[in-house]
Image (cartoon, rainbow, N blue to C red):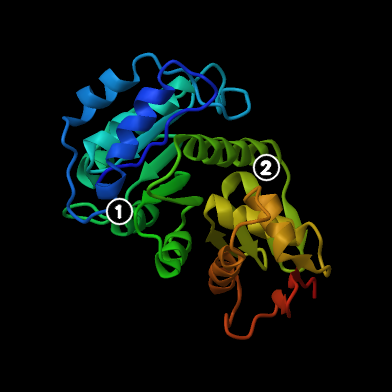
């Protein structure tokens, strides 16, 4: 399927050409099994040669480790989509590689783990959901954005439930994708700065840098990065109510997103930390407001 890439604004040299091109294909962009008329990579490259960076407000190029540019892996079975996404992100200063299937993605990840994974859901042989579950089962905690035409609430919640950091629906404006990439990487960078010290509340001690919780000084529980961030916000304010909006703002840098995301991650934390997730003792719901972490 095609990615509906809206023309860049602000008088850029390629704005009219790209905008008109993609408007002409808007009617087939979301049809099942639709295929681009022009060859993927070469068509996209020829159309985009004189395009400048997005008009997203300037931000620093994120360097997660000293002297190294952020490395992003894009997995989508549409070469047309991957070519355009790769071009847009390279314009922002990122190192970007692409592949059209999960098998190739796993081989690339085993050789070099990316800082961010952008992943389609509907792909041959293995879905994006299945691939993500395999990654998590094998211990990879790579930040992940789903990029897909599946826009149902059920699909979004499933994506967040298995560990996505964000979810963007096709068709979309390239500037929105760039902004979401910036936001996810900004959260990672901020999280790494704050991971130096453990937090203990009652029998539970959180070690952010290790993505680990120790219960009663004995039981070790592994967390994903997003789970750790949610738990850290709650444990930093023991016995105080933290609203869903506060969690969205602190963890996802977004107070307009669907609060169901928060509930999904609370459910995951309860399954990992509570003796009985159906009757939690540590992470307590406060009706119509949010949650609090109880110290006793």
**Percent from the top left, x then y, of residue 160?**
48, 60
Q: Is residue 109 visible?
A: no
Q: Is residue 172 left or right of residue 9?
A: left
Residue appearing at x 49%, y 21% in the figure: 53
Residue appearing at x 27%, y 41% in the figure: 25
Compared with 180, 277 (above or below) is: below
Residue that mark 1 sits on = 131
Q: Could you say which is closer to the camera, residue 78 or residue 37?
A: 37
Separation of marks 2 and 1 at Cα, in angstroms: 28 Å
Between discs 2 and 1, the one toward the N terminus:
1
User: How dense is the environment of label 1, judged by Cα within 10 Å: few (below 14), some, or many (20 and up)?
Assistant: some
**Percent from the top left, x then y, of residue 219?**
58, 66
**Percent from the top left, x then y, of residue 95?**
41, 23
User: How dense is the environment of label 2, judged by Cα within 10 Å: few (below 14), some, or many (20 and up)?
Assistant: some
Residue that mark 2 sits on = 195
Quarter of the rendering containing residue 293: bottom right
Q: Could you say which is closer to the camera, residue 282 or residue 264?
A: 264
Q: Which element carries disc 2, helix, strand or loop? A: loop
Residue appearing at x 71%, y 77% in the figure: 284
């Amino acid at each position: 399927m095609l990615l509906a890439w809206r023309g860049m604004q602000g008088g850029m040299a390629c704005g009219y050409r790209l905008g008109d091109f993609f408007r002409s294909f808007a009617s087939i962009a979301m049809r099942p099994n639709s295929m681009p008329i022009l060859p993927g990579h070469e068509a996209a490259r020829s159309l985009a040669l004189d395009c400048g960076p997005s008009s997203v407000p300037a931000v620093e190029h994120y360097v997660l480790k000293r002297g190294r540019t952020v490395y992003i892996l894009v997995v989508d079975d549409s070469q047309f989509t991957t070519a355009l996404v790769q071009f847009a992100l390279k314009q922002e200063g990122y190192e970007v590689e692409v592949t059209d299937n999960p098998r190739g993605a796993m081989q690339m990840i085993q050789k070099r783990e990316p800082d961010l994974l952008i992943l389609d859901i509907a792909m041959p042989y293995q879905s994006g959901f299945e691939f993500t579950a395999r990654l998590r089962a094998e211990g990879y905690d790579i930040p992940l954005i789903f990029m897909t035409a599946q826009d149902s609430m059920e699909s979004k919640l499933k994506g967040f439930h298995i560990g996505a950091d964000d979810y963007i629906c096709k068709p979309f404006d390239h500037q929105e994708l760039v902004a979401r990439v910036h936001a996810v990487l900004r959260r990672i960078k901020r999280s790494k700065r704050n991971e130096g010290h453990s937090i203990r509340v009652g029998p539970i001690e959180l070690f952010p840098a290790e993505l680990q919780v120790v219960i009663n000084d004995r039981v070790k529980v592994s967390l994903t990065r997003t789970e750790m961030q949610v738990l850290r916000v709650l444990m930093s304010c023991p016995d105080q109510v933290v609203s869903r909006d506060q969690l969205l703002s602190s963890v996802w840098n977004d107070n307009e997103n669907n609060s169901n995301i928060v509930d999904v991650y609370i459910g995951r934390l309860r399954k990992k930390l509570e003796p009985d997730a159906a009757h939690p003792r540590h992470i307590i719901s406060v009706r119509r407001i949010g949650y609090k972490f109880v110290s006793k």
